Image (cartoon, rainbow, N blue to C red):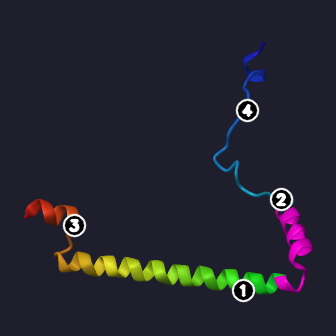
Amino acid sequence: MPKHLNQGPTHHPDSMALGSTEIVILVVFGILIFGANKIPQLARGVGRAKGEFQMGMKEASEMAAIEDMDRGGMTDEVSSEQE
């Protein structure tokens, strides 16, 4: 059997990405389950939750940076090694 015919399944790095067909199916499924009037409310809620999550992540990284500055810019591991 020629080598190019026996390649088997190929895995691409983006094989889990959603295509346009899958997105359309999900939108139709969402409209059937929630109704057309609820979709904007759900999207707003998801957007707000995402914004709050991002603000929390930003605050956490700022707090970590402040703690690093209290140790002279060193991480916990480096500062404990020097003690």
Mark 2: few/some/many CA within 10 Å (<14, 14-19, 20+): few
Q: Which residue bears the numbered disc 1?
A: 44
**At 90% from the left edge and 82% from the top edge, which residue is drawn?**
36
Amino acid carrying label 3: it is Asp
Query: Label 3 to label 1, Cα distance in Å?
Result: 40 Å
CB contact under 8 Å: marks 2 and 4: no
Q: Which residue bears the numbered disc 4?
A: 9
Amino acid carrying label 2: it is Glu
**Mark 1 or 2 closer to N-term?**
2
Amino acid carrying label 1: it is Arg
Query: Label 1 to label 2, Cα distance in Å?
Result: 22 Å
**At 89% from the left edge and 74% from the top edge, which residue is drawn?**
31
Dot 1 falls on a residue whose secondary structure is: helix
Q: Which residue bears the numbered disc 3?
A: 76
Disc on res. 22: 2
Query: Label 1 to label 4, Cα distance in Å?
Result: 40 Å
**Mark 3 or 2 closer to N-term?**
2
**Mark 2 or 4 closer to N-term?**
4
The range drawn in magenta is 22-38
